[in-house]
Image: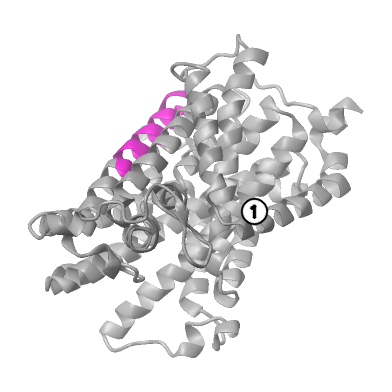
């Protein structure tokens, strides 16, 4: 059947795509760290502790990190063996066929697009707080969406447009900017750890699991360590964006797996340490605030460190937006190159060696969403979309080991099929702890995607043209 036709892959397929091969293993690792350390560590840590897991949010991070580790190993194998900038979309095309690839590509567009817009609105809040601190606060009309009583969230829309220009200039410039801001936020986290280590009160860790492993709040929302793991999973969104850089890596078979795995391990360790110190500094009940890390430092009277953390948050969220936005454009580019989206988006600028049309269209759309629409719970769509992608990538390793046993695999997933199946199982399990409204919204988005596929993509696919 047409909908199950698969792509073949051979070494060298992506050697001459027009994209600039300029990224080292070091650059890719920093891309991963840039994407992972942001909203999760500066915002979700406190909120998940206060509302879902208590001090046991540390265990939530461990569980989410283990699920991501299994997925990361699967990504590493397929990034090295299949390659391409399409990430889970490209891997699914080779393993499962066109329809599944389209669905996961459509899912990734939602994941990266909504995540970028969601982080932009968070960034805008911190940026306006910084302006307020120096007496230059913007009026509410320019910091709130129309449905919130304003005209436009100007900082949120503006930062997306600035990143759009940066990505257009070239990947080397974007990677350098990302590296500088990653250093800033790691310095900030280092300061927090060094201060918090001397202000821990072990009594704040009691009770350690006030919500248990799982349960429901009075309003019916999931609570407990496992629900906390499903929530803080947003903190890990982005390491998969490293795989979208495969066509711009100098040695993708070696460097992409390294960047994926090392950035995830490094960031997981930092998350666990920060979560433990944060809940040890102040009672977890006081952490349900927009900036729990800065708030906790303010509560213990270390105001200079609180101000420094605010700076780190702005830098941290900027790198998250940059990498997620980058990942969105590369998936969009790959789908267009395969004919599933209009070929207009598959052009690479000869000078900057970037897909400027995709970058411009995506940037304008995300800017409008961030500026005019309050995202609210839509951010939860990012979690379910990411988990769905992880499940398919994990299963893709198992399927390709059976269908193409002789495919060159520079990096091999250990203990196949145990680790990939554990990844698929654990990610599926976390999806079960997300609110049902998230599932409904996700189903609607995928339903729209299926309509687009059967009305356009199936007829314009390059595989269709080759078989005609």
Residue found 87% across the figure and 27% down from its top: 1
Residue furthest to the top: 406
Q: Name the residue at the right extreme.
A: 468
Q: Quadrant of residue 53?
A: bottom left
Q: Is 246 covered by the magenta stretch?
A: no
Q: Residue furthest left?
A: 198
On screen, residue 438 versus residue 318, left or right, reads: right
Reading the image, the residue beneath label 1 is: 439
Q: Is residue 254 magenta?
A: yes
Could you tell me if residue 352 is visible in this image?
A: no
Is the residue marked by circle 1 packed among few (<14), some (14-19), or many (20+) residues within 10 Å?
some
In the image, the segment drawn in magenta is 251-268
Q: Residue at x 53, y 55 (%)?
A: 325
**Front-lying residue, 176 or 203:** 203
Which of the two residues, 356 or 432, is positioned nearer the viewer here? Answer: 432
Give the vertical position of 425 relative to 217 (above or below). Answer: above
In the rendered image, the vertical position of residue 270 relative to residue 50, given as above or below: above
Q: Quadrant of the rendered structure where residue 101 is?
A: top right
Where does residue 386 sit, x and y in percent of width and height?
A: 55, 46
């Amino acid at each position: 059947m047409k909908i199950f036709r698969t792509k073949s892959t051979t070494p060298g397929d992506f050697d001459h795509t027009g994209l600039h091969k300029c990224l080292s293993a070091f650059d890719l690792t920093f891309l991963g760290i840039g994407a992972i350390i942001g909203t999760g560590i500066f915002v979700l840590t406190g909120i998940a502790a206060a509302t879902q897991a208590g001090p046991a949010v540390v265990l939530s991070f461990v569980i989410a990190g283990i699920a991501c580790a299994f997925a990361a190993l699967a990504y590493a194998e397929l990034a090295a063996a299949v390659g391409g900038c399409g990430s889970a979309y490209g891997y699914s095309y080779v393993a499962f066929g066109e329809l599944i690839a389209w669905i996961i590509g459509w899912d990734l567009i939602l994941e990266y697009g909504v995540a970028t817009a969601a982080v932009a609105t968070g960034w805008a809040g911190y940026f306006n707080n910084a302006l307020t601190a120096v007496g230059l606060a913007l009026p509410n009309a320019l910091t709130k969406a129309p449905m919130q009583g304003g005209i436009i969230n100007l900082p949120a829309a503006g930062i997306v447009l600035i990143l759009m220009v940066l990505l257009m200039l070239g990947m080397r410039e974007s990677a350098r900017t990302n590296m500088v801001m990653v250093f800033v936020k790691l310095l900030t986290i280092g300061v927090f750890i060094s201060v918090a280590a001397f202000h821990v009160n072990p009594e704040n860790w009691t009770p350690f699991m006030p919500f248990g492993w799982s349960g429901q709040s009075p309003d019916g929302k999931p609570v407990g360590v496992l629900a906390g793991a499903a929530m803080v999973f947003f903190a890990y969104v982005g390491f998969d964006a490293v795989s979208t850089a495969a066509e711009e890596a100098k040695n993708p078979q070696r460097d992409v797996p390294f960047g994926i795995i090392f950035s995830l391990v490094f960031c997981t360790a930092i998350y666990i340490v920060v979560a433990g110190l944060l809940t040890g500094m102040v009672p977890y009940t006081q952490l349900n605030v927009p900036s729990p890390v800065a708030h906790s430092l303010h509560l213990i009277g270390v105001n200079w460190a609180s101000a420094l953390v605010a700076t780190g948050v702005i830098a941290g969220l900027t790198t998250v937006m940059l990498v997620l936005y980058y990942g969105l454009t590369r998936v969009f580019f790959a789908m267009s190159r395969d004919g599933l989206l209009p070929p207009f988006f598959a052009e690479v600028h000869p000078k900057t060696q970037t897909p400027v049309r995709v970058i411009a269209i995506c940037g304008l759309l995300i800017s409008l969403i961030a500026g005019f629409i309050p995202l609210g719970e839509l951010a939860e769509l990012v979690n379910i979309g990411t988990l769905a992608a992880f499940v398919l990538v994990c299963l893709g390793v198992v399927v390709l080991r059976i269908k193409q046993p002789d495919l060159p695999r520079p990096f091999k997933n250990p203990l196949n099929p145990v680790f990939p199946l554990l990844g698929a199982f654990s990610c599926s399990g976390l999806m079960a702890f997300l609110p049902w409204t998230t599932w409904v919204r996700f189903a609607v988005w995928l339903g729209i995607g299926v309509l687009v596929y059967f009305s356009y993509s199936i007829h314009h696919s390059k595989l269709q043209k080759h078989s005609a």
